[in-house]
Amino acid sequence: MLYDQVVEATQAIQQHTEVKPALAIILGSGLGDLANEIRDAVAIPYSEIPHFAQSTVVGHAGRLLIGTLSGVPVVAMQGRFHFYEGHPVHLTTLPVRVMRLLGAETLIVSNAAGGVNPAYLPGHFMLLRDHIYMPGLAGGSPLVGPHDERLGERFPAVGKAYDAELRALAHEVADRYPEITLHEGVYTMVAGPSYETPAELAFLRTIGTDAVGMSTAPEVVVARQVGMRVLGISLITNSATGSEAAEVNHAEVLSTADAVRTKFANLVMGIVERIGAQ
Ligand code: HPA
Protein backbone atom coordinates (compact mmCIF):
# COMPACT_ATOMS: atom_id res chain seq x y z
CA MET A 1 0.00 0.00 0.00
CA LEU A 2 1.25 3.49 -0.89
CA TYR A 3 0.40 4.81 2.56
CA ASP A 4 2.55 2.17 4.26
CA GLN A 5 5.43 3.03 1.94
CA VAL A 6 5.10 6.71 2.89
CA VAL A 7 5.18 5.81 6.60
CA GLU A 8 8.21 3.54 6.18
CA ALA A 9 10.15 6.18 4.25
CA THR A 10 9.25 8.83 6.82
CA GLN A 11 10.35 6.66 9.74
CA ALA A 12 13.65 5.85 8.02
CA ILE A 13 14.35 9.57 7.58
CA GLN A 14 13.45 10.30 11.19
CA GLN A 15 16.23 7.91 12.28
CA HIS A 16 18.71 10.47 10.90
CA THR A 17 17.45 13.66 12.51
CA GLU A 18 15.21 15.09 15.18
CA VAL A 19 14.48 18.21 13.12
CA LYS A 20 10.79 18.55 12.26
CA PRO A 21 10.67 20.52 9.02
CA ALA A 22 7.99 23.18 8.62
CA LEU A 23 8.70 23.75 4.95
CA ALA A 24 9.55 21.51 1.99
CA ILE A 25 11.57 22.60 -1.02
CA ILE A 26 12.01 20.80 -4.34
CA LEU A 27 15.05 22.04 -6.22
CA GLY A 28 14.79 21.90 -10.00
CA SER A 29 17.38 21.29 -12.73
CA GLY A 30 20.61 23.07 -11.94
CA LEU A 31 19.05 24.80 -8.92
CA GLY A 32 20.37 22.35 -6.35
CA ASP A 33 23.04 24.79 -5.18
CA LEU A 34 20.66 26.36 -2.74
CA ALA A 35 21.18 23.21 -0.69
CA ASN A 36 24.60 24.62 0.30
CA GLU A 37 22.80 27.33 2.23
CA ILE A 38 21.01 24.85 4.49
CA ARG A 39 22.65 24.96 7.92
CA ASP A 40 23.43 21.90 10.04
CA ALA A 41 22.10 19.79 7.19
CA VAL A 42 21.70 16.06 7.41
CA ALA A 43 21.95 14.67 3.85
CA ILE A 44 20.31 11.36 3.09
CA PRO A 45 20.91 9.78 -0.34
CA TYR A 46 17.68 8.57 -1.95
CA SER A 47 19.26 5.12 -2.18
CA GLU A 48 19.05 4.93 1.64
CA ILE A 49 15.36 5.81 1.84
CA PRO A 50 12.94 2.91 1.38
CA HIS A 51 10.60 3.25 -1.61
CA PHE A 52 12.38 6.33 -3.01
CA ALA A 53 13.33 6.01 -6.67
CA GLN A 54 16.77 7.09 -7.88
CA SER A 55 17.18 10.31 -9.83
CA THR A 56 19.00 9.58 -13.06
CA VAL A 57 19.33 12.97 -14.73
CA VAL A 58 22.57 14.95 -15.07
CA GLY A 59 22.22 18.15 -13.05
CA HIS A 60 20.03 16.44 -10.45
CA ALA A 61 21.77 15.13 -7.34
CA GLY A 62 19.75 12.52 -5.53
CA ARG A 63 19.48 13.35 -1.87
CA LEU A 64 17.24 14.74 0.79
CA LEU A 65 18.55 17.48 3.07
CA ILE A 66 17.09 18.38 6.41
CA GLY A 67 18.35 21.43 8.28
CA THR A 68 17.71 25.12 8.72
CA LEU A 69 17.33 27.69 5.94
CA SER A 70 16.93 31.38 6.85
CA GLY A 71 16.12 30.22 10.38
CA VAL A 72 13.32 27.87 9.27
CA PRO A 73 13.52 24.06 9.65
CA VAL A 74 13.32 22.69 6.10
CA VAL A 75 13.45 19.49 4.14
CA ALA A 76 14.80 19.87 0.61
CA MET A 77 14.96 17.51 -2.33
CA GLN A 78 18.20 18.02 -4.24
CA GLY A 79 17.07 16.27 -7.38
CA ARG A 80 13.58 15.06 -8.13
CA PHE A 81 11.95 12.20 -10.00
CA HIS A 82 10.46 12.66 -13.44
CA PHE A 83 7.92 10.56 -15.21
CA TYR A 84 10.20 10.43 -18.28
CA GLU A 85 12.80 8.52 -16.25
CA GLY A 86 10.41 5.61 -16.30
CA HIS A 87 9.17 5.83 -12.73
CA PRO A 88 5.47 5.22 -12.18
CA VAL A 89 3.98 8.66 -11.59
CA HIS A 90 2.73 7.87 -8.07
CA LEU A 91 6.36 7.13 -7.10
CA THR A 92 7.62 10.42 -8.57
CA THR A 93 5.39 12.18 -6.04
CA LEU A 94 5.95 9.88 -3.05
CA PRO A 95 8.52 12.29 -1.57
CA VAL A 96 5.86 15.02 -1.34
CA ARG A 97 3.73 12.75 0.84
CA VAL A 98 6.80 11.91 2.93
CA MET A 99 7.76 15.56 3.40
CA ARG A 100 4.20 16.31 4.55
CA LEU A 101 4.32 13.46 7.06
CA LEU A 102 7.67 14.75 8.32
CA GLY A 103 5.79 17.93 9.24
CA ALA A 104 6.09 20.30 6.27
CA GLU A 105 2.95 22.38 5.76
CA THR A 106 4.24 24.49 2.88
CA LEU A 107 5.93 23.43 -0.36
CA ILE A 108 8.20 25.60 -2.48
CA VAL A 109 8.63 23.79 -5.78
CA SER A 110 11.04 24.98 -8.45
CA ASN A 111 11.81 23.94 -12.00
CA ALA A 112 13.63 24.88 -15.15
CA ALA A 113 11.24 25.78 -17.95
CA GLY A 114 11.12 27.06 -21.49
CA GLY A 115 9.66 30.54 -22.04
CA VAL A 116 6.67 30.13 -24.34
CA ASN A 117 5.57 33.69 -23.64
CA PRO A 118 7.99 35.74 -25.79
CA ALA A 119 8.49 38.25 -22.97
CA TYR A 120 9.74 35.53 -20.60
CA LEU A 121 13.46 35.43 -21.33
CA PRO A 122 16.28 33.15 -20.21
CA GLY A 123 17.35 34.15 -16.70
CA HIS A 124 13.91 35.49 -15.77
CA PHE A 125 11.81 33.81 -13.09
CA MET A 126 8.09 33.05 -13.19
CA LEU A 127 5.79 32.36 -10.27
CA LEU A 128 3.22 29.74 -11.17
CA ARG A 129 -0.27 31.20 -10.99
CA ASP A 130 -1.83 28.09 -12.48
CA HIS A 131 -0.85 25.02 -14.44
CA ILE A 132 -2.00 22.87 -17.34
CA TYR A 133 -1.11 19.30 -16.53
CA MET A 134 -1.15 17.67 -19.96
CA PRO A 135 -0.41 14.07 -18.87
CA GLY A 136 -2.75 14.51 -15.89
CA LEU A 137 -5.64 15.56 -18.12
CA ALA A 138 -5.04 12.45 -20.19
CA GLY A 139 -5.03 9.91 -17.34
CA GLY A 140 -1.48 10.27 -16.03
CA SER A 141 -2.29 11.79 -12.63
CA PRO A 142 -0.51 10.36 -9.56
CA LEU A 143 -3.95 10.13 -7.93
CA VAL A 144 -5.17 7.51 -10.41
CA GLY A 145 -5.68 4.17 -8.73
CA PRO A 146 -7.51 2.67 -5.78
CA HIS A 147 -8.33 5.32 -3.21
CA ASP A 148 -6.99 5.23 0.33
CA GLU A 149 -8.63 7.73 2.71
CA ARG A 150 -5.36 8.14 4.58
CA LEU A 151 -3.78 9.78 1.51
CA GLY A 152 -6.35 12.58 1.33
CA GLU A 153 -9.48 13.29 -0.66
CA ARG A 154 -10.50 11.24 -3.68
CA PHE A 155 -11.30 14.39 -5.72
CA PRO A 156 -9.09 17.22 -4.43
CA ALA A 157 -9.73 20.72 -5.77
CA VAL A 158 -6.70 22.38 -7.36
CA GLY A 159 -8.30 25.62 -8.53
CA LYS A 160 -6.35 27.64 -5.96
CA ALA A 161 -3.29 25.42 -5.87
CA TYR A 162 -0.79 28.27 -6.03
CA ASP A 163 -1.26 30.27 -2.84
CA ALA A 164 -1.99 33.95 -3.60
CA GLU A 165 -0.54 35.17 -0.31
CA LEU A 166 2.76 33.35 -0.91
CA ARG A 167 2.93 34.79 -4.42
CA ALA A 168 2.45 38.32 -3.07
CA LEU A 169 5.19 37.71 -0.54
CA ALA A 170 7.53 36.40 -3.27
CA HIS A 171 6.97 39.55 -5.33
CA GLU A 172 7.85 41.68 -2.30
CA VAL A 173 11.12 39.79 -1.88
CA ALA A 174 11.94 40.02 -5.62
CA ASP A 175 11.33 43.79 -5.53
CA ARG A 176 14.35 44.10 -3.21
CA TYR A 177 16.62 42.76 -6.00
CA PRO A 178 16.67 44.98 -9.10
CA GLU A 179 18.53 42.25 -11.02
CA ILE A 180 15.65 39.77 -10.54
CA THR A 181 12.80 39.76 -13.08
CA LEU A 182 9.86 37.86 -11.65
CA HIS A 183 6.82 37.21 -13.85
CA GLU A 184 3.69 35.30 -13.03
CA GLY A 185 2.03 32.86 -15.40
CA VAL A 186 0.72 29.49 -16.44
CA TYR A 187 3.09 26.50 -16.42
CA THR A 188 2.28 23.61 -18.72
CA MET A 189 3.69 20.21 -17.89
CA VAL A 190 4.50 17.93 -20.79
CA ALA A 191 5.81 14.40 -20.33
CA GLY A 192 9.04 14.86 -22.34
CA PRO A 193 11.85 13.99 -22.56
CA SER A 194 12.09 15.31 -26.13
CA TYR A 195 11.68 19.06 -26.32
CA GLU A 196 8.66 20.43 -28.16
CA THR A 197 8.26 20.97 -31.88
CA PRO A 198 7.37 24.47 -33.16
CA ALA A 199 3.82 23.24 -33.84
CA GLU A 200 3.52 21.93 -30.28
CA LEU A 201 4.79 25.23 -28.90
CA ALA A 202 2.28 27.16 -31.01
CA PHE A 203 -0.43 24.89 -29.58
CA LEU A 204 0.80 25.38 -26.01
CA ARG A 205 0.78 29.14 -26.45
CA THR A 206 -2.74 29.06 -27.87
CA ILE A 207 -4.02 27.22 -24.81
CA GLY A 208 -2.53 29.82 -22.47
CA THR A 209 0.94 28.54 -21.60
CA ASP A 210 3.60 30.98 -20.46
CA ALA A 211 6.27 28.40 -19.59
CA VAL A 212 6.71 24.71 -20.41
CA GLY A 213 8.51 22.01 -18.46
CA MET A 214 8.56 18.34 -17.57
CA SER A 215 7.83 18.32 -13.84
CA THR A 216 6.04 20.04 -10.95
CA ALA A 217 2.34 19.59 -11.81
CA PRO A 218 2.17 16.02 -10.37
CA GLU A 219 3.93 17.13 -7.19
CA VAL A 220 1.56 20.07 -6.81
CA VAL A 221 -1.52 17.90 -7.25
CA VAL A 222 -0.29 15.60 -4.49
CA ALA A 223 0.70 18.54 -2.28
CA ARG A 224 -2.86 19.83 -2.55
CA GLN A 225 -4.28 16.41 -1.78
CA VAL A 226 -2.29 16.38 1.46
CA GLY A 227 -3.27 19.98 2.23
CA MET A 228 0.01 21.84 1.71
CA ARG A 229 0.28 25.50 0.72
CA VAL A 230 2.23 25.72 -2.51
CA LEU A 231 4.53 28.26 -4.09
CA GLY A 232 5.85 27.34 -7.55
CA ILE A 233 8.83 29.06 -9.20
CA SER A 234 10.07 28.46 -12.73
CA LEU A 235 13.45 29.58 -13.90
CA ILE A 236 13.19 30.36 -17.60
CA THR A 237 16.28 28.67 -19.03
CA ASN A 238 15.55 29.03 -22.75
CA SER A 239 13.10 30.64 -25.12
CA ALA A 240 10.47 28.20 -26.35
CA THR A 241 8.35 30.29 -28.69
CA GLY A 242 8.86 27.97 -31.64
CA SER A 243 10.78 30.50 -33.71
CA GLU A 244 14.23 29.96 -32.17
CA ALA A 245 17.04 29.65 -34.72
CA ALA A 246 18.98 27.19 -32.56
CA GLU A 247 17.50 24.07 -30.99
CA VAL A 248 17.33 23.90 -27.19
CA ASN A 249 19.50 21.39 -25.35
CA HIS A 250 19.98 20.23 -21.76
CA ALA A 251 23.43 21.89 -21.50
CA GLU A 252 21.83 25.27 -22.26
CA VAL A 253 19.22 24.63 -19.57
CA LEU A 254 21.94 23.83 -17.02
CA SER A 255 24.19 26.75 -17.96
CA THR A 256 21.34 29.28 -17.58
CA ALA A 257 20.49 27.76 -14.21
CA ASP A 258 24.13 27.99 -13.15
CA ALA A 259 24.33 31.64 -14.19
CA VAL A 260 21.40 32.64 -11.97
CA ARG A 261 22.05 30.46 -8.96
CA THR A 262 22.82 33.41 -6.66
CA LYS A 263 19.63 35.21 -7.71
CA PHE A 264 17.61 32.04 -7.17
CA ALA A 265 19.19 31.47 -3.74
CA ASN A 266 18.51 35.07 -2.68
CA LEU A 267 14.92 34.88 -3.86
CA VAL A 268 14.14 31.59 -2.15
CA MET A 269 15.98 32.45 1.08
CA GLY A 270 14.14 35.77 1.26
CA ILE A 271 10.82 33.99 0.77
CA VAL A 272 11.64 31.34 3.38
CA GLU A 273 12.61 34.03 5.88
CA ARG A 274 9.27 35.76 5.34
CA ILE A 275 7.33 32.51 5.64
CA GLY A 276 9.20 31.78 8.88
CA ALA A 277 8.15 35.17 10.25
CA GLN A 278 4.45 34.52 9.56
N1 HPA B 1 10.67 22.45 -22.78
C1 HPA B 1 10.37 21.55 -21.84
N2 HPA B 1 11.02 21.46 -20.69
C2 HPA B 1 12.00 22.33 -20.46
C3 HPA B 1 12.37 23.32 -21.39
C4 HPA B 1 11.67 23.37 -22.62
O1 HPA B 1 11.93 24.21 -23.49
N3 HPA B 1 13.39 24.03 -20.83
C5 HPA B 1 13.63 23.50 -19.61
N4 HPA B 1 12.79 22.47 -19.37
Image (cartoon, rainbow, N blue to C red):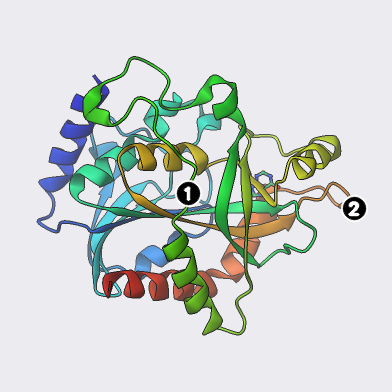
Disc 2 CB within 8 Å of nearest ligand 1 atom:
no
Check the picture and name the quadrant holding the C terminus: bottom left
Name the residue: 61% across, 85% down: 178
Residue 251, percent across and down?
66, 53
Q: Circle 2 — which element?
A: loop
Res. 33 in view = no
Q: Is residue 254 visible from the viewing direction of this image? A: yes
Task: Identify whether 4 is placed above or below 98.
Answer: above
Question: Which residue is more in the foreground, 117 or 33?
Answer: 117
**Residue linked to disc 1:** 60
- The answer to whether residue 226 is left or right of residue 131 is left
Q: What element does badge 1 sit on?
A: loop
Where residue 97 appears, as percent x and y from the top left, is: 29, 38
Q: Is mark 1 within 8 Å of ligand 1?
A: no
Residue situated furthest top in the rendering: 146
Q: Residues at badges 1 and 2 in contact (C-beta under 8 Å)?
A: no
Q: CA distance from mark 1 to mark 2?
A: 28 Å
The residue positioned 24% from the left and 38% from the top of the image is 49
Q: Amino acid at mark 2?
A: Ala
Q: What's the residue at 43%, 36% (across, down)?
A: 157
When the figure is inspected, residue 77 is found, relative to residue 207, above or below; the finding is below
Q: Residues within 10 Å of mark 1 (few under 14, many from 20)?
A: some
- Decide which of tag 1 and tag 2 comes sooner along the chain: 1
Give the residue drawn at x 48%, y 69%: 168
- Image label count: 2
What's under tag 1, amino acid-wise? His
Judged by depth in the image, the label closer to the viewer, 1 or 2, is 2
The residue that disc 2 covers is 245
Residue 41 image offset from top left, x and y in percent: 23, 63
Label annotation for residue 140: none
